[in-house]
């Protein structure tokens, strides 16, 4: 593998190919963290400015810490995330997580292509008087494909360092100034929200951050060390999260007519020439997320099909995602994607528990030499998911939402993320400790 031939399957990445330092990882995750989707997500908080900023800080710290630790574990093992889950869930048990992650990554690929196309449509409407959203979906689907074919190392060194980070930095500075100028921050500071729940806001921020946990090792397996992976991913994602949810809340609260994500994009585009240029830079940068989700869908599929060509999988995923985006509205399935995200908070609890009990290090045998199934760990994960959904009460999903509502959910509390993570982690420790201890005793007796 080289920068120009980036394909690498699910086997551990050798030391000679682990070339991404802390600064590389920081740039990568800062770029991935700068997203129109996150700016758009502030429209769903419904909180006052004070509440939104506090929710952003709390949710960002929790979610980014989880992301950083998952990045560290991925750098330690040197394998993609879905292959990594062979250790806690079993060789075939990992297929359950893989299927969900493929759905999630493919869904986010569609969502990102749609967001980019709507932003580009707002720009073309402003400049040319036509939306042409279908055309933009084709354009940015193709661009996401091209970036995904570069692979993580080529993407960072040939795109992020040379183009992405500079365009994003300039656009962020401009948008920050523009939002503050039009935001009436002094008035908003003492104003109320729109009936939103603080802990639901925290959960949304955590969910959007933790949605990257099932992908993070796909990139940090190329990191030079565990520390650089932790700092690069955790800090790199945390800083843009603070910016976008904080400034997104100011933008949304300052424009009461904003009722959804498309309104946020058109509001920014209507701010003048400088704002249009800033939105253009963010639109181009949004292809980072399309790249990551297309690439990780293909890499996740390799957990099923380790001998399949990664390049062919990338092309197939990009074509399918673009085709789906042509027939999907922006808001039709956000709740479904967040439902999938609810699986990954407790799944991380199970992974972290198993990794700690294994001595904070996964060998190749941990990943590829374990049993086919580890039912106790899978059960711990499912219990955590059910607890999350019982507390969170995901809406708009038909039977599932009605079923949850009939279970007398709790009111108040500290949201769904921390309880589901804690329960899954505790159960997983209880399940895995006896087995690991017995294995150590057997090795000692054989010695």
Image (spheres, grey):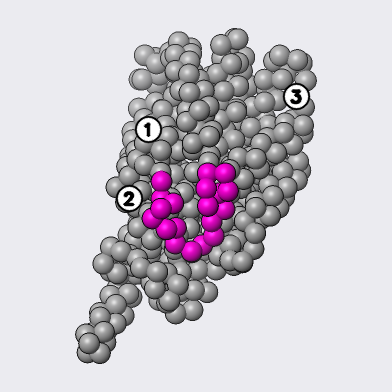
| In contact (CB < 8 Å): disc 3 and disc 2 | no
Note whether residue 60 is visible.
no
Horizontal side of 32 relative to 66 (left or right) equals right
From the image, tell me which residue sits under label 3: 131
| For discs 3 and 1, the disc positioned in front in the rendered view | 1
Foreground pick, 239 / 439:
439
From the image, tell me which residue sits under label 1: 239
Foreground pick, 222 / 403:
222
Q: How many marks?
A: 3
Looking at the magenta stretch, what is its main secondary structure?
Answer: loop
Q: x%, y% of residue 337?
A: 57, 50
Q: Residue at the location (55% across, 37% down)? A: 288
Q: Is residue 23 magenta?
A: no
Q: Residue at the location (32% across, 51% down)? A: 226
Span colored in magenta? 1-19
Compared to residue 388, the image places residue 378 above or below, namely: below
| In contact (CB < 8 Å): disc 2 and disc 1 | no
From the image, tell me which residue sits under label 2: 225
Q: x%, y% of residue 8?
A: 53, 56
Horizontal side of 179 relative to 127 (left or right) equals left
Question: Does dot 2 land on a helix, a strand or a loop?
Answer: loop
């Amino acid at each position: 593998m080289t920068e120009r031939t980036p394909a690498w399957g699910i086997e551990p990445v050798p030391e000679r190919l682990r070339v991404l330092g802390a600064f590389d990882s920081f740039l990568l995750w800062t770029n991935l963290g700068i997203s129109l989707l996150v700016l758009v997500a502030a429209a769903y908080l419904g909180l006052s400015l004070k509440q939104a900023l506090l929710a952003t800080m709390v949710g960002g710290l929790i979610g980014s810490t989880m992301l950083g630790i998952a990045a560290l574990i991925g750098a330690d093992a040197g394998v993609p995330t879905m292959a990594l889950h062979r250790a806690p869930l079993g060789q075939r048990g990992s297929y359950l997580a893989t299927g969900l992650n493929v759905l999630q990554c493919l869904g986010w690929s569609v969502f990102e292509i749609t967001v980019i196309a709507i932003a580009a449509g707002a720009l073309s409407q402003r400049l040319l008087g036509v939306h042409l959203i279908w055309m933009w979906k084709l354009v940015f689907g193709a661009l996401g494909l091209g970036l995904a074919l570069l692979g993580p190392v080529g993407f960072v060194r040939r795109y992020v360092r040379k183009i992405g980070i500079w365009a994003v930095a300039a656009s962020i500075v401009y948008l920050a100034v523009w939002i503050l100028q039009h935001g009436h921050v002094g008035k908003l500071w003492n104003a109320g929200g729109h009936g939103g729940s603080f802990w639901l806001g925290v959960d949304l921020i955590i969910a959007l951050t933790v949605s990257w946990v099932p992908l993070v090792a796909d990139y940090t397996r190329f990191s030079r060390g565990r520390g650089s992976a932790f700092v690069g991913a955790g800090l790199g994602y945390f800083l843009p999260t603070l910016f976008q949810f904080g400034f997104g809340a100011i933008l949304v609260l300052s424009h009461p007519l904003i009722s959804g994500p498309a309104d946020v994009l058109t509001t920014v585009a209507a701010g003048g020439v400088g704002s249009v240029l800033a939105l253009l830079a963010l639109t181009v940068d949004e292809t980072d997320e399309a790249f990551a989700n297309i690439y990780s869908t293909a890499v996740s599929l390799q957990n099923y099909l380790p001998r399949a060509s990664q390049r062919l999988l990338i092309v197939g995923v990009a074509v399918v995602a673009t085709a789906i985006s042509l027939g999907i509205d922006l808001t039709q399935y956000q709740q479904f994607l967040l439902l999938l995200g609810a699986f990954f908070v407790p799944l991380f609890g199970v992974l972290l528990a198993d990794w700690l009990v294994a001595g904070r290090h996964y060998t190749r045998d941990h990943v590829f030499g374990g049993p086919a199934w580890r039912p106790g760990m899978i059960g711990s994960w499912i219990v955590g998911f059910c607890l999350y959904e019982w507390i969170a009460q995901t809406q708009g999903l038909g039977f599932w939402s009605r079923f949850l509502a009939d279970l007398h959910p709790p009111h108040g509390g500290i949201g769904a993320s921390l309880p589901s993570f804690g329960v899954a982690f505790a159960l997983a420790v209880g399940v895995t400790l006896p087995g690991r201890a017995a294995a150590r005793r057997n090795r000692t007796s054989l010695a």
